[in-house]
Image (tube, rainbow, N blue to C red):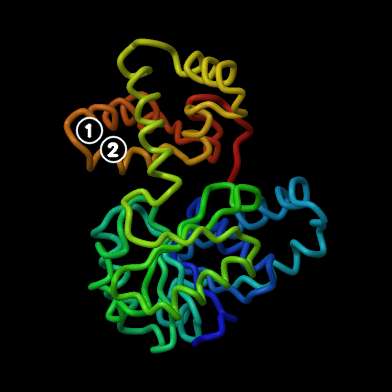
Amino acid sequence: MTNIDKVTILGTGVMGSQIAFQIAYSGFDVSAYDINEEILEQARKKFAHLAAVYEKEVPNANSDKTAKAIARISLSSNLADAVADADIVIEAVPEVLEIKRDIYEKLAKVAPAKTILATNSSTLLPSDMKDFTGRPDRFLAMHFANMIWKLNTAEIMGTPDTDPAVFDTVVAFASQIGMVPIPIHKEKAGYVLNSLLVPWLNAAADLAAGGYAEPEDVDKVWHIATGAPLGPFQIYDIIGLKTPYNILSHGDAHEQKLAAWLKENYIDKGKLGISTGAGFYTYPKQV
């Protein structure tokens, strides 16, 4: 079975940049791929921002360790170059099946035979994508939570075609990069985290979109009544509103109405969550 030394991340958005930085911080060489140099320049800024976050929030982190992590990350807008020697490729492109299909069909032509392919999809099943990969036996899901440096779970879920040795290798790799691996024994839409989280977030959106209560008051009830540190709309802002929007817009008629509410009142106004400095709440603007 392949030893994992070299890692490629496809996509340098909120999650892709976090995954790349965490893996590099854990001592692995990482190639981060995105579609053009302009996006990659934004990725460099994200890595610098993450370095500052790690130095503030991760035990024993310091500027020397974060500088070494950044030095381990190479960036490329050439897919073949990015995956040329990869032991594992972790895909973190937008949560749209057509986009994922396109990247996997391209990837199948250029990734080495040894390469394990993993999707960070938060809602799609790996079976939805396995036929695009050209290697369903070496394909599975490896789903990370946002704020990976402290909310450090990695949900690992294969398909009936996934080689058990590949599954075990990825579980071991998750531990090596500071994650708590959560093996999922059969496919489940939403995995563990989102099977719990998405209905909860939808219920909160329904209360606000329906005019029953303001988002701040929904969060206030949750804080006081459960003792939880974060309410649902604070979680929305951490996730970023585009991912929930994409999920809702592919749902039933009611979910599509919630998607339209998010779009009209927040997304179209540039309020995408913490990363843009505003969502349901306001924040210092990040890169």
Report the front residue among 232 and 158.
158
According to the image, label 2 marks what residue? 248
**Residue 265 occupies quadrant:** top left
Q: Residue at x 69, y 65 (%)?
A: 25
Report the front residue among 50 and 146.
146
Question: In the structure shown, which secondary structural element does the residue marked by tag 2 occupy?
Answer: helix
Report the front residue among 150 and 102.
150
From the viewer's perspective, is residue 209 above or below residue 60? above
Q: Residue at x 82, y 64 (%)?
A: 64
In the image, 129: left or right of 265? left
From the viewer's perspective, is residue 41 above or below residue 136? above
Q: Residue at x 79, y 52 (%)?
A: 59
Numbered mark located on residue 256 in the image: 1
Report the front residue among 130 and 40.
130
Q: Give neighbour class at mark 2: few <14, some 14-19, many 20+ (Cα, 10 Å).
A: many
Residue 56, position as x, y percentages in the image:
77, 46
Residue 179, position as x, y percentages in the image:
61, 60
Question: In the structure shown, which secondary structural element does the residue marked by tag 1 occupy?
Answer: helix
Residue 187, position as x, y percentages in the image:
32, 59
Specify which label sits upstream in the sequence, 1 or 2: 2
**Type of the residue with mark 1:** Gln
Q: Give neighbour class at mark 1: few <14, some 14-19, many 20+ (Cα, 10 Å).
A: some
Residue 96, position as x, y percentages in the image:
29, 53
